[in-house]
Image (spheres, rainbow, N blue to C red):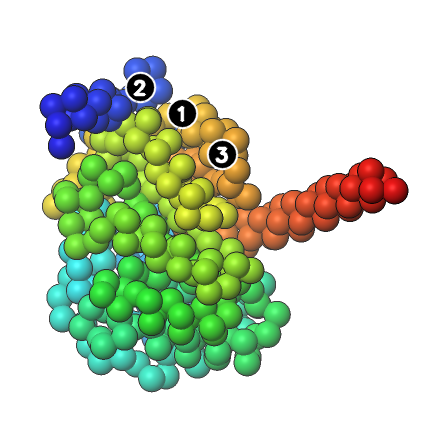
């Protein structure tokens, strides 16, 4: 990197004044959430325990668990609860995972059926220890869901399948998920400290690869804010995502799960999130969710329905436009 580009990077990474508040011990009011107590919450929890399923809601200490589980919306985390990576922001345990549970696909499908889910989100830990990175288990889960709950739409949130990405994406996309999500998490400058085991451009390529295999699959990605990223850096990530054809962007506030994890650098205000959301919409994403409590799977079902409607509208407009152009050409020719 040249001196000038270093200077530019520093300038671009400076948080915009007036758009954030300095981090302090207590979380700002807009982050506070209610304690998770409700009948729906208890029922969701019991079902997950009965079926021996892990959820990212619990493992990531998600602040929305009270709201989501009350509505029977949980994000199932397959392939165990031990991850082979150690990202600085993530609360999931790191170590040597156990063998893959062959009963898991059936249990996930049973959970979807018993919860009556219209839309399900499935994620996993990273399994760099497996020859296929865990792609085969995603395929089995998608097939089990299609068989047992054919009307449930399926959203998957996968790791980057380092070194095994092309085969993994090909197999998973062939199984036919409705939404393929893979989070970029942060701006490329912060990867060495926040996501040291991953590569920004490899993650972008994964999402491009999904579209290359099947353009009908919606692609989705997200970033956490408050890690020290700059406004222009975030705009650049949006541009990179659009270039990769990503349909849906999620942006939420990073929260430090324990004192051992990377610190929050700033609490981005709800107004700043709205401004980022407006810019993202102007850049052409079909769907954008941007708020302090937004997480990849927050309101995923409602957002999926909106995104599908937005695509249908876009296709209808494109079709009408094509008809008008054809009519104009025919008139000129006549
Ligand atoms: S936002 Fe996602 S991870 Fe958090 S509780 Fe809701 S479903 Fe679970």
Question: How many numbered marks are there?
Answer: 3
Residues marked 2 and 3 touching at CB (< 8 Å): no
User: Looking at the image, which residue is at 26% across and 31% down?
Assistant: 229
Q: From the viewer's perspective, is the residue at label 2 or at label 1 nearer?
A: 2
Please provide percent x and percent y for residue 211. 47, 58
Q: CA distance from mark 3 to mark 1?
A: 17 Å
Q: Which residue is mark 3?
A: 283
Assess disc 1: are there few (<14), some (14-19) or many (≥20) residues with their C-alpha within 10 Å of its C-alpha: some
User: Looking at the image, which residue is at 77% across and 45% down?
Assistant: 326
Assess disc 3: are there few (<14), some (14-19) or many (≥20) residues with their C-alpha within 10 Å of its C-alpha: some
Secondary-structure class at tag 3: loop
* Residue situated furthest bottom in the rendering: 102
Q: Which residue is mark 1?
A: 272
Regarding residue 269, the answer to whether it shows in the image is: yes
Q: Which residue is mark 2?
A: 16
Secondary-structure class at tag 2: loop
Q: From the viewer's perspective, is the residue at label 2 or at label 3 nearer?
A: 3
Please provide percent x and percent y for residue 67. 46, 49
Please provide percent x and percent y for residue 136. 35, 77
N-term mark: 3 or 1: 1
Residues marked 2 and 1 touching at CB (< 8 Å): yes
Q: Nearer the viewer, residue 262 or 322?
A: 322
User: Looking at the image, which residue is at 49% across and 34% down?
Assistant: 283
Q: Is mark 2 within 8 Å of ligand 1?
A: no
Assess disc 2: are there few (<14), some (14-19) or many (≥20) residues with their C-alpha within 10 Å of its C-alpha: few
In the figure, 110 relative to 326: above or below? Answer: below
Q: CA distance from mark 2 to mark 1?
A: 9 Å
Q: Which quarter of the figure is the C terminus placed in?
A: top right
Please provide percent x and percent y for residue 275. 45, 25
User: Looking at the image, which residue is at 55% across and 80% down?
Assistant: 147
């Amino acid at each position: 990197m040249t001196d000038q580009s270093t200077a530019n990077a520093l300038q671009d990474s400076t948080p915009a004044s007036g758009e954030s508040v300095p981090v302090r011990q207590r979380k700002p009011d807009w982050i506070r959430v209610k304690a998770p107590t409700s009948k729906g919450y208890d029922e969701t929890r019991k079902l997950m325990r009965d079926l021996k399923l892990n959820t990212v809601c619990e493992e990531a200490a998600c602040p929305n668990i009270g709201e989501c589980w009350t509505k029977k919306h949980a994000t199932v985390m397959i392939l165990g609860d031990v991850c082979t990576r150690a990202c600085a922001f993530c609360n999931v345990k790191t170590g040597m995972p156990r063998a893959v549970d062959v009963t898991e696909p059936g249990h996930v499908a049973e959970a979807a059926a018993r919860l009556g889910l219209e839309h399900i989100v499935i994620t996993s830990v990273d399994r760099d220890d497996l020859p296929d990175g865990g792609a085969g288990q995603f395929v089995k889960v998608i097939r089990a869901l299609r068989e047992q709950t054919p009307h449930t739409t399926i959203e998957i949130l996968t790791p980057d399948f380092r070194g095994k990405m092309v085969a993994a994406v090909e197999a998973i996309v062939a199984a036919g998920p409705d939404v393929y999500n893979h989070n970029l998490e942060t701006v490329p400058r912060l990867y060495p400290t926040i996501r040291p085991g991953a590569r920004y451009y490899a993650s972008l390529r994964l999402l491009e690869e999904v579209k290359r295999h099947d353009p009908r699959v919606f692609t989705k990605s997200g970033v956490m804010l408050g890690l020290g990223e700059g406004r222009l850096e975030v705009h650049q990530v949006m541009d990179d995502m659009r270039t990769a054809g990503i349909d849906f962007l999620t942006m939420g506030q990073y929260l430090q799960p324990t004192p051992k994890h990377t610190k929050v650098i700033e609490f981005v205000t709800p107004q700043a999130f709205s401004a980022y959301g407006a810019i993202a919409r102007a850049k052409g994403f079909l769907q954008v969710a941007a708020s302090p409590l937004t997480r990849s799977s927050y309101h995923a079902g409602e957002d999926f329905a909106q995104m599908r409607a937005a695509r249908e509208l876009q296709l209808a407009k494109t079709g009408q436009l094509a008809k008008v152009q054809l009519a104009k050409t025919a008139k000129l020719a006549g």
